[in-house]
Amino acid sequence: NEPLLAVDDLHVEFATRAGLVRAVNGVSYSLQAGETLAVLGESGSGKSVTAQAIMGILDMPPARIPKGEVRFNGTDLLRLSEEARTQVRGQRIAMIFQDALSALNPVFTVGWQISEMFRVHRGMGKRDAVKKAVELMDRVRIPGAKQRVNDYPHQFSGGMRQRIMIAMAIALDPEVLIADEPTTALDVTVQAQVMELLAELQRESNMGMILITHDLGVVADVADKIAVMYGGRIVENASVHDIYKAPAHPYTKGLLESIPRVDLKGQDLYAIKGLPPNLLDMPTGCAFHPRCPYRQDNCVTDSPPLYEISGTRNSACHYWREVLDGDQG
Ligand code: SF4
Ligand code: MG
């Protein structure tokens, strides 16, 4: 049963002046229609780079994909011609980014920018295309869409601009929607509203959705499964339920304990000590060992494989059993 989208043993490297940066190191994940995968990690973990590889915007220097596949309905996108890939990218797989203001063109009305999707890709005339734009603005719940279709991006709030980006992304009914930190620039209330909208749209259309975030708290209610990335690798993947019940990697555990909980006011938030790894000078053995409260001697020398805990769960920690049981070190 071939998934809708499958990233398989993906490797991405960047030639930089300081040396070769291995940004993604053998990442695999998959997505079914109607499913939401949250890809979680700090900046530099490789979560955005993996998404860029899916979108096909990494196949030129200094980026290189030495190994791996990105299969969409069974076809490897990395081996498609540029022309064939253009039919997929932005249409059947769409992406939204963190920064809606810079992604929108300030000199065109939002109606014009949304309707462009229909004019360019569906060959619609201007009038019909603008009508579709208004429908889409309604669908992403922009109040007074009909009156606002001729407004410019700066006349909208941050949350409304992100809704406009979402409207453009879903305009052509994509099968996969990738959202890279879609709510990071927004305040907490608006974050929740945008997440709710994404979840609703996904339910209506049965899209597969990849939510890229550094904030486990944001995705808890909408994701089905989570892939946690660290230093260009997946260190844990599991259902949201399993991860919340008991994480199987110390890094996931740290992320969970960093989420502010309303029911535990005044608690000390556990923030993971130390810095993310330097991709030019990765720690030996387990890349997380300099920060890990569970570290043993062999962690410094032996790189952990992605151990299979169950059919749907993996952890790249030699001591995942201890982590699951919750006894520290
Ligand atoms: Fe920590 Fe060792 Fe597990 Fe790495 S392998 S996460 S250092 S316990
Ligand atoms: Mg990023």
Image (cartoon, helix red, strand yellow):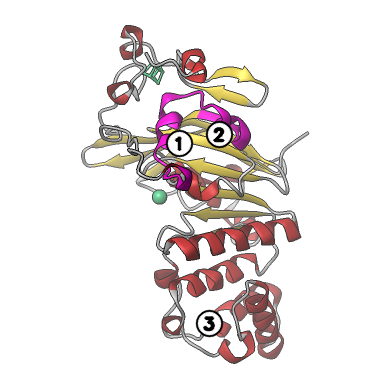
Q: Which residue is mark 1?
A: 256
Q: Is the residue under label 2 in contact with that under label 1 (CB below 8 Å)?
A: yes
For the point 45% across and 68% down, the residue is 100
The part of the chain drawn in magenta is 236-263
Element marked by disc 1 = helix
Q: Which residue is outermost to the top?
A: 297
The local crowd at label 2, few if under 14, some if 14 to 19, many if 20 or more residues have their Cα within 10 Å, is some
Image position, residue 327 (x, y; %): 44, 15
Residue 177 image-quadrant placement: bottom right
Name which residue type carries label 2.
Tyr
For the point 65% across and 27% down, the residue is 312
Q: Which residue is mark 2?
A: 244
The local crowd at label 3, few if under 14, some if 14 to 19, many if 20 or more residues have their Cα within 10 Å, is many
Name which residue type carries label 3.
Val
**With 90 as the anchor, is 311 left or right in this view?**
right
The answer for how far apart the CA atoms under marks 3 and 1 are is: 38 Å
